[in-house]
Amino acid sequence: MEAALESVVSRLESETGADIGAAIRHGVMSGGKRLRPILCTTAYRASGGGANGLIYPLAVSLELIHAYSLMHDDLPCMDDAELRRGCPTTHVDHGEDVTSRAGAALIPAAALQALSSAAQLECGPKGAIDVARELMEAAGAGGMIGGQWLDLEGEGECLGLDELNGLYRRKTGALLMASLVVGARAARGSDHVVEALRRYGASIGLAFQIADDVLDATQSAETLGKRPSDAELDKSTYVGLYGLEEARNRARAHVDDALEALSSGGIDAPALNSLALYVVERDK
Amino acid sequence: MEAALESVVSRLESETGADIGAAIRHGVMSGGKRLRPILCTTAYRASGGGANGLIYPLAVSLELIHAYSLMHDDLPCMDDAELRRGCPTTHVDHGEDVTSRAGAALIPAAALQALSSAAQLECGPKGAIDVARELMEAAGAGGMIGGQWLDLEGEGECLGLDELNGLYRRKTGALLMASLVVGARAARGSDHVVEALRRYGASIGLAFQIADDVLDATQSAETLGKRPSDAELDKSTYVGLYGLEEARNRARAHVDDALEALSSGGIDAPALNSLALYVVERDK
Protein backbone atom coordinates (compact mmCIF):
# COMPACT_ATOMS: atom_id res chain seq x y z
CA MET A 1 0.00 0.00 0.00
CA GLU A 2 2.82 2.38 0.88
CA ALA A 3 4.49 1.66 -2.46
CA ALA A 4 1.26 2.39 -4.33
CA LEU A 5 0.86 5.65 -2.39
CA GLU A 6 4.49 6.58 -3.02
CA SER A 7 3.94 6.07 -6.73
CA VAL A 8 0.95 8.46 -6.77
CA VAL A 9 2.69 11.07 -4.64
CA SER A 10 5.83 10.98 -6.81
CA ARG A 11 3.72 11.54 -9.90
CA LEU A 12 1.88 14.44 -8.28
CA GLU A 13 5.20 15.97 -7.21
CA SER A 14 6.52 15.82 -10.75
CA GLU A 15 3.31 17.35 -12.15
CA THR A 16 3.22 20.30 -9.81
CA GLY A 17 5.47 22.88 -8.18
CA ALA A 18 7.82 21.90 -5.39
CA ASP A 19 5.74 23.56 -2.67
CA ILE A 20 2.46 21.85 -3.50
CA GLY A 21 4.29 18.58 -4.00
CA ALA A 22 5.94 18.81 -0.60
CA ALA A 23 2.62 19.58 1.10
CA ILE A 24 0.97 16.63 -0.66
CA ARG A 25 3.81 14.35 0.48
CA HIS A 26 3.45 15.65 4.03
CA GLY A 27 -0.30 15.08 4.04
CA VAL A 28 -0.28 11.64 2.42
CA MET A 29 2.99 10.01 3.50
CA SER A 30 3.13 10.84 7.22
CA GLY A 31 1.86 7.48 8.38
CA GLY A 32 -1.69 6.76 9.38
CA LYS A 33 -3.53 3.49 9.75
CA ARG A 34 -4.36 3.19 6.02
CA LEU A 35 -7.67 1.76 7.20
CA ARG A 36 -9.66 2.83 4.13
CA PRO A 37 -7.41 1.24 1.49
CA ILE A 38 -7.08 -1.88 3.65
CA LEU A 39 -10.89 -2.14 3.86
CA CYS A 40 -11.11 -1.65 0.11
CA THR A 41 -8.54 -4.36 -0.61
CA THR A 42 -10.16 -6.77 1.84
CA ALA A 43 -13.65 -6.17 0.42
CA TYR A 44 -12.29 -6.67 -3.10
CA ARG A 45 -10.84 -10.06 -2.22
CA ALA A 46 -13.90 -11.07 -0.18
CA SER A 47 -16.01 -10.31 -3.28
CA GLY A 48 -14.03 -12.58 -5.55
CA GLY A 49 -11.35 -10.15 -6.76
CA GLY A 50 -7.94 -11.50 -7.73
CA ALA A 51 -5.21 -11.99 -5.14
CA ASN A 52 -2.68 -10.03 -7.21
CA GLY A 53 -1.75 -6.45 -6.32
CA LEU A 54 -3.86 -4.77 -9.02
CA ILE A 55 -6.31 -3.52 -6.38
CA TYR A 56 -3.71 -1.34 -4.62
CA PRO A 57 -3.70 1.53 -7.13
CA LEU A 58 -7.49 1.74 -6.72
CA ALA A 59 -7.40 1.34 -2.94
CA VAL A 60 -5.08 4.31 -2.48
CA SER A 61 -7.66 6.64 -4.06
CA LEU A 62 -9.57 6.36 -0.76
CA GLU A 63 -6.49 7.39 1.21
CA LEU A 64 -6.05 10.45 -1.02
CA ILE A 65 -9.55 11.64 -0.12
CA HIS A 66 -8.90 10.88 3.54
CA ALA A 67 -5.61 12.83 3.47
CA TYR A 68 -7.38 15.78 1.82
CA SER A 69 -9.99 15.76 4.59
CA LEU A 70 -7.38 15.82 7.37
CA MET A 71 -5.33 18.58 5.70
CA HIS A 72 -8.40 20.83 5.42
CA ASP A 73 -9.85 19.85 8.83
CA ASP A 74 -6.65 20.98 10.54
CA LEU A 75 -6.56 24.43 8.84
CA PRO A 76 -6.74 27.52 11.08
CA CYS A 77 -10.22 28.44 9.76
CA MET A 78 -11.43 24.90 10.59
CA ASP A 79 -10.24 22.94 13.67
CA ASP A 80 -6.97 24.90 13.88
CA ALA A 81 -4.94 21.82 14.88
CA GLU A 82 -1.16 21.89 15.08
CA LEU A 83 -0.36 18.25 15.75
CA ARG A 84 -1.33 15.05 13.94
CA ARG A 85 0.30 11.62 14.05
CA GLY A 86 2.86 13.08 16.40
CA CYS A 87 4.06 15.67 13.88
CA PRO A 88 3.19 19.27 12.99
CA THR A 89 0.15 19.43 10.71
CA THR A 90 0.68 20.20 7.04
CA HIS A 91 -0.20 23.88 7.24
CA VAL A 92 2.17 24.39 10.18
CA ASP A 93 5.07 23.15 8.07
CA HIS A 94 3.95 24.31 4.62
CA GLY A 95 1.60 27.26 5.12
CA GLU A 96 -2.14 27.68 4.92
CA ASP A 97 -2.31 28.69 1.25
CA VAL A 98 -0.21 25.78 -0.02
CA THR A 99 -2.04 23.29 2.18
CA SER A 100 -5.41 24.50 0.98
CA ARG A 101 -4.35 24.09 -2.67
CA ALA A 102 -2.55 20.79 -2.08
CA GLY A 103 -5.52 19.33 -0.23
CA ALA A 104 -7.96 20.34 -2.96
CA ALA A 105 -5.63 18.86 -5.59
CA LEU A 106 -6.02 15.45 -3.95
CA ILE A 107 -9.70 15.31 -4.95
CA PRO A 108 -9.18 15.27 -8.74
CA ALA A 109 -6.09 13.11 -8.16
CA ALA A 110 -8.28 10.55 -6.38
CA ALA A 111 -10.90 10.65 -9.14
CA LEU A 112 -8.23 10.08 -11.79
CA GLN A 113 -6.61 7.31 -9.79
CA ALA A 114 -9.95 5.53 -9.34
CA LEU A 115 -10.99 5.87 -12.98
CA SER A 116 -7.74 4.60 -14.43
CA SER A 117 -7.10 1.80 -11.97
CA ALA A 118 -10.67 0.42 -11.73
CA ALA A 119 -10.85 0.05 -15.50
CA GLN A 120 -8.02 -2.53 -15.21
CA LEU A 121 -9.96 -4.69 -12.74
CA GLU A 122 -12.80 -7.21 -13.04
CA CYS A 123 -15.40 -4.42 -13.30
CA GLY A 124 -13.88 -3.14 -16.54
CA PRO A 125 -14.23 0.39 -17.95
CA LYS A 126 -18.01 0.49 -17.57
CA GLY A 127 -17.87 -0.60 -13.93
CA ALA A 128 -15.10 1.96 -13.35
CA ILE A 129 -17.71 4.68 -13.71
CA ASP A 130 -19.75 3.21 -10.84
CA VAL A 131 -16.61 2.85 -8.76
CA ALA A 132 -15.58 6.47 -9.33
CA ARG A 133 -19.13 7.67 -8.66
CA GLU A 134 -19.17 5.83 -5.34
CA LEU A 135 -15.90 7.52 -4.35
CA MET A 136 -16.94 11.01 -5.43
CA GLU A 137 -20.38 10.73 -3.80
CA ALA A 138 -18.77 9.68 -0.53
CA ALA A 139 -16.30 12.56 -0.73
CA GLY A 140 -18.77 15.26 -1.74
CA ALA A 141 -21.38 17.56 -0.27
CA GLY A 142 -23.80 14.70 0.42
CA GLY A 143 -21.07 12.72 2.20
CA MET A 144 -17.80 13.62 3.85
CA ILE A 145 -17.50 17.31 2.99
CA GLY A 146 -21.08 17.86 4.18
CA GLY A 147 -20.22 15.96 7.36
CA GLN A 148 -17.09 18.04 7.93
CA TRP A 149 -19.28 21.10 7.80
CA LEU A 150 -21.87 19.67 10.21
CA ASP A 151 -18.97 18.90 12.53
CA LEU A 152 -17.75 22.50 12.46
CA GLU A 153 -21.25 23.90 12.72
CA GLY A 154 -22.03 21.64 15.69
CA GLU A 155 -19.27 23.13 17.84
CA GLY A 156 -20.85 24.70 20.92
CA GLU A 157 -24.22 23.11 20.08
CA CYS A 158 -25.80 20.33 22.09
CA LEU A 159 -26.60 17.68 19.47
CA GLY A 160 -29.02 14.83 20.17
CA LEU A 161 -28.39 11.23 19.18
CA ASP A 162 -30.01 11.47 15.74
CA GLU A 163 -28.10 14.60 14.81
CA LEU A 164 -24.83 13.13 16.07
CA ASN A 165 -25.38 9.89 14.15
CA GLY A 166 -26.24 11.88 11.02
CA LEU A 167 -23.02 13.84 11.39
CA TYR A 168 -20.91 10.71 12.00
CA ARG A 169 -22.48 8.83 9.09
CA ARG A 170 -21.36 11.58 6.76
CA LYS A 171 -18.10 12.79 8.28
CA THR A 172 -16.60 9.33 8.88
CA GLY A 173 -19.09 6.71 7.73
CA ALA A 174 -19.51 7.73 4.10
CA LEU A 175 -15.86 7.20 3.16
CA LEU A 176 -15.46 4.01 5.20
CA MET A 177 -18.59 2.61 3.56
CA ALA A 178 -17.35 3.68 0.13
CA SER A 179 -14.04 1.92 0.80
CA LEU A 180 -15.89 -1.38 1.02
CA VAL A 181 -18.30 -0.75 -1.84
CA VAL A 182 -15.50 0.43 -4.14
CA GLY A 183 -13.59 -2.80 -3.46
CA ALA A 184 -16.67 -4.99 -3.92
CA ARG A 185 -17.78 -3.25 -7.12
CA ALA A 186 -14.27 -3.40 -8.59
CA ALA A 187 -14.43 -7.20 -8.19
CA ARG A 188 -17.92 -7.26 -9.73
CA GLY A 189 -19.34 -8.57 -6.47
CA SER A 190 -23.05 -9.43 -6.54
CA ASP A 191 -25.58 -6.82 -5.42
CA HIS A 192 -26.23 -9.00 -2.39
CA VAL A 193 -22.58 -8.88 -1.34
CA VAL A 194 -22.27 -5.17 -2.11
CA GLU A 195 -25.27 -4.37 0.08
CA ALA A 196 -23.98 -6.53 2.93
CA LEU A 197 -20.62 -4.74 2.77
CA ARG A 198 -22.40 -1.40 2.65
CA ARG A 199 -24.20 -2.31 5.90
CA TYR A 200 -20.94 -3.54 7.40
CA GLY A 201 -19.28 -0.25 6.39
CA ALA A 202 -22.07 1.88 7.85
CA SER A 203 -21.82 0.02 11.15
CA ILE A 204 -18.05 0.15 11.52
CA GLY A 205 -18.23 3.82 10.49
CA LEU A 206 -20.37 4.63 13.53
CA ALA A 207 -18.28 2.34 15.74
CA PHE A 208 -15.10 4.06 14.52
CA GLN A 209 -16.35 7.53 15.33
CA ILE A 210 -17.70 6.55 18.76
CA ALA A 211 -14.33 4.92 19.49
CA ASP A 212 -12.74 8.25 18.46
CA ASP A 213 -14.92 10.00 21.05
CA VAL A 214 -13.72 7.55 23.70
CA LEU A 215 -10.06 7.95 22.70
CA ASP A 216 -10.35 11.74 22.69
CA ALA A 217 -11.72 11.60 26.25
CA THR A 218 -9.27 9.07 27.63
CA GLN A 219 -5.93 9.18 25.83
CA SER A 220 -3.03 11.59 26.08
CA ALA A 221 -1.77 13.68 23.18
CA GLU A 222 1.36 11.53 23.27
CA THR A 223 -0.57 8.32 22.57
CA LEU A 224 -2.96 9.89 20.07
CA GLY A 225 -0.30 11.83 18.22
CA LYS A 226 -2.69 14.80 18.25
CA ARG A 227 -4.23 17.00 20.91
CA PRO A 228 -7.54 15.72 22.27
CA SER A 229 -9.85 18.56 21.24
CA ASP A 230 -13.53 17.59 21.63
CA ALA A 231 -13.88 19.28 25.02
CA GLU A 232 -11.88 22.32 23.97
CA LEU A 233 -13.92 22.79 20.77
CA ASP A 234 -17.09 22.05 22.73
CA LYS A 235 -18.14 19.25 20.39
CA SER A 236 -21.04 16.91 21.11
CA THR A 237 -19.83 13.32 21.52
CA TYR A 238 -21.12 9.94 22.59
CA VAL A 239 -19.06 10.27 25.75
CA GLY A 240 -20.76 13.57 26.50
CA LEU A 241 -24.21 12.13 25.80
CA TYR A 242 -23.86 8.77 27.54
CA GLY A 243 -20.62 8.62 29.50
CA LEU A 244 -17.60 6.43 28.78
CA GLU A 245 -19.00 3.02 29.65
CA GLU A 246 -22.19 3.34 27.61
CA ALA A 247 -20.28 4.90 24.68
CA ARG A 248 -18.03 1.83 24.65
CA ASN A 249 -21.08 -0.45 24.76
CA ARG A 250 -22.68 1.32 21.84
CA ALA A 251 -19.52 1.16 19.77
CA ARG A 252 -19.37 -2.55 20.43
CA ALA A 253 -23.05 -2.96 19.48
CA HIS A 254 -22.31 -1.39 16.09
CA VAL A 255 -19.43 -3.82 15.64
CA ASP A 256 -21.89 -6.66 16.34
CA ASP A 257 -24.18 -5.22 13.64
CA ALA A 258 -21.22 -5.19 11.26
CA LEU A 259 -20.40 -8.85 11.98
CA GLU A 260 -24.07 -9.75 11.53
CA ALA A 261 -24.08 -7.99 8.13
CA LEU A 262 -21.15 -10.14 7.05
CA SER A 263 -22.75 -13.41 8.07
CA SER A 264 -26.17 -12.52 6.64
CA GLY A 265 -24.40 -11.64 3.36
CA GLY A 266 -22.66 -15.03 3.38
CA ILE A 267 -19.29 -13.29 3.43
CA ASP A 268 -16.60 -15.49 4.93
CA ALA A 269 -13.65 -13.13 5.32
CA PRO A 270 -11.90 -13.36 8.68
CA ALA A 271 -9.95 -10.19 7.91
CA LEU A 272 -13.19 -8.18 7.84
CA ASN A 273 -14.16 -9.59 11.24
CA SER A 274 -10.77 -8.61 12.63
CA LEU A 275 -10.97 -5.14 11.11
CA ALA A 276 -14.37 -4.53 12.73
CA LEU A 277 -12.93 -5.44 16.12
CA TYR A 278 -9.81 -3.36 15.51
CA VAL A 279 -11.96 -0.28 14.91
CA VAL A 280 -13.04 -0.23 18.57
CA GLU A 281 -9.96 -1.81 20.13
CA ARG A 282 -7.31 0.50 18.67
CA ASP A 283 -5.50 2.87 21.03
CA LYS A 284 -5.12 5.77 18.58
CA MET B 1 -27.18 26.70 -19.42
CA GLU B 2 -28.59 28.57 -16.44
CA ALA B 3 -31.35 25.98 -16.11
CA ALA B 4 -28.82 23.14 -16.15
CA LEU B 5 -26.73 24.92 -13.51
CA GLU B 6 -29.83 25.60 -11.41
CA SER B 7 -30.67 21.91 -11.52
CA VAL B 8 -27.21 20.93 -10.20
CA VAL B 9 -27.20 23.62 -7.51
CA SER B 10 -30.69 22.65 -6.30
CA ARG B 11 -29.59 19.05 -5.99
CA LEU B 12 -26.46 20.02 -4.07
CA GLU B 13 -28.55 22.23 -1.77
CA SER B 14 -30.87 19.35 -0.98
CA GLU B 15 -27.93 16.99 -0.32
CA THR B 16 -26.12 19.24 2.07
CA GLY B 17 -26.71 21.64 4.95
CA ALA B 18 -28.27 25.03 4.36
CA ASP B 19 -25.02 26.91 4.87
CA ILE B 20 -22.93 24.95 2.38
CA GLY B 21 -25.84 25.00 -0.06
CA ALA B 22 -26.17 28.77 0.18
CA ALA B 23 -22.44 29.26 -0.39
CA ILE B 24 -22.54 26.94 -3.42
CA ARG B 25 -25.48 28.92 -4.82
CA HIS B 26 -23.60 32.17 -4.25
CA GLY B 27 -20.47 30.86 -5.95
CA VAL B 28 -22.17 29.24 -8.93
CA MET B 29 -25.29 31.32 -9.62
CA SER B 30 -23.98 34.89 -9.32
CA GLY B 31 -23.64 35.44 -13.04
CA GLY B 32 -20.42 35.14 -14.97
CA LYS B 33 -19.82 34.76 -18.66
CA ARG B 34 -20.36 30.96 -18.66
CA LEU B 35 -17.53 30.90 -21.21
CA ARG B 36 -16.36 27.37 -20.38
CA PRO B 37 -19.72 25.59 -20.79
CA ILE B 38 -20.40 27.64 -23.92
CA LEU B 39 -17.07 26.55 -25.39
CA CYS B 40 -17.87 22.94 -24.45
CA THR B 41 -21.29 23.07 -26.10
CA THR B 42 -19.93 24.74 -29.22
CA ALA B 43 -17.07 22.25 -29.53
CA TYR B 44 -19.54 19.38 -29.08
CA ARG B 45 -21.71 20.59 -31.93
CA ALA B 46 -18.71 21.43 -34.13
CA SER B 47 -17.54 17.83 -33.62
CA GLY B 48 -20.79 16.30 -34.82
CA GLY B 49 -22.69 16.16 -31.53
CA GLY B 50 -26.49 16.36 -31.59
CA ALA B 51 -28.25 19.72 -31.56
CA ASN B 52 -30.49 18.71 -28.63
CA GLY B 53 -29.79 19.96 -25.11
CA LEU B 54 -28.20 16.76 -23.80
CA ILE B 55 -24.79 18.44 -23.77
CA TYR B 56 -25.77 21.05 -21.17
CA PRO B 57 -25.59 18.77 -18.11
CA LEU B 58 -22.04 17.88 -19.15
CA ALA B 59 -21.08 21.45 -20.06
CA VAL B 60 -21.95 22.78 -16.61
CA SER B 61 -19.37 20.48 -14.99
CA LEU B 62 -16.76 22.92 -16.34
CA GLU B 63 -18.51 25.85 -14.69
CA LEU B 64 -18.55 24.00 -11.35
CA ILE B 65 -14.76 23.68 -11.46
CA HIS B 66 -14.46 27.33 -12.51
CA ALA B 67 -16.72 28.44 -9.63
CA TYR B 68 -14.65 26.39 -7.18
CA SER B 69 -11.49 28.11 -8.42
CA LEU B 70 -12.92 31.60 -7.94
CA MET B 71 -14.29 30.81 -4.47
CA HIS B 72 -10.90 29.58 -3.28
CA ASP B 73 -8.88 32.25 -5.15
CA ASP B 74 -10.80 34.98 -3.34
CA LEU B 75 -10.22 33.53 0.17
CA PRO B 76 -8.31 35.66 2.70
CA CYS B 77 -5.32 33.28 2.66
CA MET B 78 -5.20 33.52 -1.15
CA ASP B 79 -5.96 36.76 -3.07
CA ASP B 80 -8.14 38.14 -0.24
CA ALA B 81 -10.67 39.66 -2.65
CA GLU B 82 -13.94 41.16 -1.43
CA LEU B 83 -15.69 41.95 -4.69
CA ARG B 84 -16.49 39.82 -7.75
CA ARG B 85 -19.09 40.36 -10.47
CA GLY B 86 -20.13 43.51 -8.62
CA CYS B 87 -21.07 41.63 -5.45
CA PRO B 88 -19.35 40.60 -2.22
CA THR B 89 -17.30 37.42 -2.70
CA THR B 90 -18.64 34.18 -1.27
CA HIS B 91 -16.54 34.20 1.90
CA VAL B 92 -17.55 37.78 2.67
CA ASP B 93 -21.22 36.75 2.72
CA HIS B 94 -20.89 33.16 3.97
CA GLY B 95 -17.64 32.93 5.93
CA GLU B 96 -14.25 31.48 5.19
CA ASP B 97 -14.88 28.01 6.61
CA VAL B 98 -18.15 27.42 4.71
CA THR B 99 -16.68 28.79 1.49
CA SER B 100 -13.66 26.55 1.74
CA ARG B 101 -15.88 23.47 2.23
CA ALA B 102 -18.43 24.54 -0.40
CA GLY B 103 -15.72 25.22 -2.97
CA ALA B 104 -14.06 21.85 -2.38
CA ALA B 105 -17.45 20.12 -2.66
CA LEU B 106 -17.76 21.42 -6.22
CA ILE B 107 -14.86 19.21 -7.37
CA PRO B 108 -16.52 15.83 -6.68
CA ALA B 109 -19.82 17.37 -7.84
CA ALA B 110 -18.20 18.21 -11.18
CA ALA B 111 -16.70 14.73 -11.51
CA LEU B 112 -20.10 13.13 -10.82
CA GLN B 113 -21.84 15.49 -13.21
CA ALA B 114 -19.36 14.71 -15.98
CA LEU B 115 -19.48 10.93 -15.45
CA SER B 116 -23.24 10.63 -15.43
CA SER B 117 -23.99 13.08 -18.23
CA ALA B 118 -21.23 12.06 -20.65
CA ALA B 119 -22.37 8.43 -20.51
CA GLN B 120 -25.66 9.60 -22.10
CA LEU B 121 -23.93 11.18 -25.09
CA GLU B 122 -22.37 9.85 -28.30
CA CYS B 123 -19.18 8.81 -26.45
CA GLY B 124 -21.11 6.31 -24.29
CA PRO B 125 -20.01 4.99 -20.90
CA LYS B 126 -16.52 4.05 -22.04
CA GLY B 127 -15.89 7.49 -23.54
CA ALA B 128 -17.28 9.07 -20.38
CA ILE B 129 -14.15 7.92 -18.57
CA ASP B 130 -11.94 9.87 -21.02
CA VAL B 131 -14.21 12.88 -20.67
CA ALA B 132 -14.05 12.82 -16.86
CA ARG B 133 -10.29 12.27 -16.94
CA GLU B 134 -9.85 15.31 -19.16
CA LEU B 135 -11.86 17.42 -16.70
CA MET B 136 -10.07 16.15 -13.59
CA GLU B 137 -6.61 16.50 -15.17
CA ALA B 138 -7.38 20.08 -16.11
CA ALA B 139 -8.64 20.83 -12.60
CA GLY B 140 -5.84 19.13 -10.70
CA ALA B 141 -2.28 19.69 -9.58
CA GLY B 142 -0.90 19.42 -13.11
CA GLY B 143 -3.47 21.95 -14.38
CA MET B 144 -5.53 24.66 -12.76
CA ILE B 145 -4.78 24.07 -9.08
CA GLY B 146 -1.05 23.96 -9.85
CA GLY B 147 -1.49 27.19 -11.83
CA GLN B 148 -3.36 28.86 -8.99
CA TRP B 149 -0.42 28.09 -6.78
CA LEU B 150 2.14 29.43 -9.30
CA ASP B 151 0.03 32.59 -9.43
CA LEU B 152 0.16 33.04 -5.66
CA GLU B 153 3.83 32.13 -5.48
CA GLY B 154 4.65 34.57 -8.28
CA GLU B 155 3.41 37.60 -6.33
CA GLY B 156 6.30 40.00 -5.78
CA GLU B 157 8.47 38.01 -8.21
CA CYS B 158 9.53 39.28 -11.62
CA LEU B 159 8.53 36.45 -13.97
CA GLY B 160 9.91 36.18 -17.50
CA LEU B 161 7.79 35.36 -20.55
CA ASP B 162 8.24 31.59 -20.33
CA GLU B 163 7.33 31.47 -16.65
CA LEU B 164 4.33 33.72 -17.19
CA ASN B 165 3.11 31.62 -20.11
CA GLY B 166 3.58 28.45 -18.07
CA LEU B 167 1.51 29.96 -15.27
CA TYR B 168 -1.24 31.16 -17.65
CA ARG B 169 -1.39 27.82 -19.48
CA ARG B 170 -2.17 26.10 -16.20
CA LYS B 171 -4.17 28.68 -14.27
CA THR B 172 -6.50 29.64 -17.15
CA GLY B 173 -5.56 27.65 -20.22
CA ALA B 174 -5.96 24.13 -18.86
CA LEU B 175 -9.67 24.45 -18.07
CA LEU B 176 -10.48 26.42 -21.25
CA MET B 177 -8.69 23.77 -23.31
CA ALA B 178 -10.50 21.01 -21.41
CA SER B 179 -13.83 22.70 -22.13
CA LEU B 180 -13.25 22.19 -25.84
CA VAL B 181 -11.79 18.70 -25.57
CA VAL B 182 -14.58 17.53 -23.26
CA GLY B 183 -17.17 18.72 -25.79
CA ALA B 184 -15.34 17.16 -28.73
CA ARG B 185 -14.76 13.84 -27.01
CA ALA B 186 -18.37 13.65 -25.83
CA ALA B 187 -19.40 13.85 -29.50
CA ARG B 188 -16.80 11.20 -30.43
CA GLY B 189 -14.99 13.75 -32.57
CA SER B 190 -12.03 12.39 -34.54
CA ASP B 191 -8.54 12.67 -33.04
CA HIS B 192 -7.76 15.22 -35.75
CA VAL B 193 -10.63 17.45 -34.63
CA VAL B 194 -9.87 16.94 -30.93
CA GLU B 195 -6.25 18.00 -31.45
CA ALA B 196 -7.27 21.06 -33.48
CA LEU B 197 -9.68 22.11 -30.72
CA ARG B 198 -6.98 21.50 -28.12
CA ARG B 199 -4.69 23.90 -30.02
CA TYR B 200 -7.54 26.39 -30.36
CA GLY B 201 -8.20 26.12 -26.61
CA ALA B 202 -4.53 26.59 -25.70
CA SER B 203 -4.37 29.72 -27.85
CA ILE B 204 -7.55 31.36 -26.59
CA GLY B 205 -6.44 30.44 -23.06
CA LEU B 206 -3.33 32.59 -23.41
CA ALA B 207 -5.29 35.31 -25.21
CA PHE B 208 -7.89 35.31 -22.43
CA GLN B 209 -5.35 35.75 -19.68
CA ILE B 210 -3.42 38.48 -21.53
CA ALA B 211 -6.75 40.26 -22.09
CA ASP B 212 -7.33 39.94 -18.34
CA ASP B 213 -3.98 41.68 -17.74
CA VAL B 214 -5.06 44.51 -20.05
CA LEU B 215 -8.48 44.83 -18.39
CA ASP B 216 -6.92 44.83 -14.92
CA ALA B 217 -4.65 47.70 -15.99
CA THR B 218 -7.25 49.78 -17.80
CA GLN B 219 -10.73 49.22 -16.39
CA SER B 220 -12.41 50.53 -13.26
CA ALA B 221 -13.70 48.30 -10.49
CA GLU B 222 -17.19 49.39 -11.54
CA THR B 223 -16.81 47.98 -15.06
CA LEU B 224 -14.91 44.85 -13.98
CA GLY B 225 -17.19 44.07 -11.04
CA LYS B 226 -14.05 43.39 -9.01
CA ARG B 227 -11.09 45.42 -7.81
CA PRO B 228 -8.18 45.52 -10.24
CA SER B 229 -5.47 43.87 -8.17
CA ASP B 230 -2.44 42.93 -10.27
CA ALA B 231 -0.48 46.04 -9.28
CA GLU B 232 -1.53 45.84 -5.64
CA LEU B 233 -0.57 42.16 -5.38
CA ASP B 234 2.62 42.89 -7.35
CA LYS B 235 1.85 40.24 -9.96
CA SER B 236 3.83 39.87 -13.17
CA THR B 237 1.65 40.56 -16.22
CA TYR B 238 1.97 41.00 -19.97
CA VAL B 239 1.24 44.71 -19.47
CA GLY B 240 4.11 44.92 -17.00
CA LEU B 241 6.46 43.05 -19.34
CA TYR B 242 5.54 44.69 -22.64
CA GLY B 243 3.23 47.64 -22.05
CA LEU B 244 -0.42 47.93 -23.06
CA GLU B 245 -0.08 48.16 -26.82
CA GLU B 246 2.22 45.17 -27.23
CA ALA B 247 0.14 43.12 -24.75
CA ARG B 248 -2.92 43.76 -26.90
CA ASN B 249 -0.96 42.75 -30.01
CA ARG B 250 0.15 39.52 -28.44
CA ALA B 251 -3.35 38.64 -27.28
CA ARG B 252 -4.57 39.20 -30.81
CA ALA B 253 -1.73 37.05 -32.22
CA HIS B 254 -2.90 34.15 -30.03
CA VAL B 255 -6.43 34.65 -31.35
CA ASP B 256 -5.01 34.37 -34.87
CA ASP B 257 -3.32 31.11 -33.84
CA ALA B 258 -6.67 29.87 -32.56
CA LEU B 259 -8.43 30.71 -35.82
CA GLU B 260 -5.62 29.03 -37.75
CA ALA B 261 -6.06 25.87 -35.62
CA LEU B 262 -9.74 25.77 -36.57
CA SER B 263 -9.12 26.09 -40.29
CA SER B 264 -6.23 23.62 -40.32
CA GLY B 265 -8.51 21.18 -38.47
CA GLY B 266 -11.21 21.67 -41.10
CA ILE B 267 -13.60 22.93 -38.42
CA ASP B 268 -16.27 25.17 -39.86
CA ALA B 269 -17.93 26.63 -36.76
CA PRO B 270 -18.53 30.39 -36.94
CA ALA B 271 -19.41 30.42 -33.23
CA LEU B 272 -15.87 29.30 -32.34
CA ASN B 273 -14.43 32.12 -34.48
CA SER B 274 -16.68 34.61 -32.69
CA LEU B 275 -15.78 33.24 -29.28
CA ALA B 276 -12.06 33.60 -30.01
CA LEU B 277 -12.58 37.26 -30.90
CA TYR B 278 -14.81 37.81 -27.88
CA VAL B 279 -12.05 36.61 -25.58
CA VAL B 280 -9.93 39.69 -26.40
CA GLU B 281 -12.71 42.16 -27.14
CA ARG B 282 -14.72 41.76 -23.93
CA ASP B 283 -14.77 44.67 -21.48
CA LYS B 284 -14.87 42.58 -18.29
Image (tube, coloured by chain):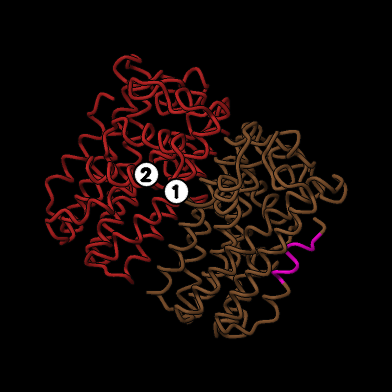
Chain colours: A brown, B red
Check if mark 1's residue and mark 2's residue have beta carbons within 8 Å: yes
Question: What residue appears at the point 64 percent right and 50 percent down from the top-left corner?
Answer: A24
Depth order, front residue of B168/B112: B112
| Residue underneath mark 2 | B64
Left or right of residue B123, residue A269 in this image: right
Residue B271, image x, y percentages: 14, 44
Hey, what amino acid is under mark 2?
A: Leu
Q: Does B5 sit above or below residue A137? A: above
Tell me if I can see residue B202 in this picture.
no
Q: Which residues are magenta?
A: A275-282
Q: Chain of mark 1?
A: B
Left or right of residue A42, residue B186 in this image: left
Hey, what amino acid is under mark 1?
A: Ile
Question: What residue appears at the point 26 percent right and 56 percent down from the top-left corner?
Answer: B183
Looking at the rendered structure, the secondary structure element under dot 1 is helix
Residue A26, image x, y percentages: 70, 50
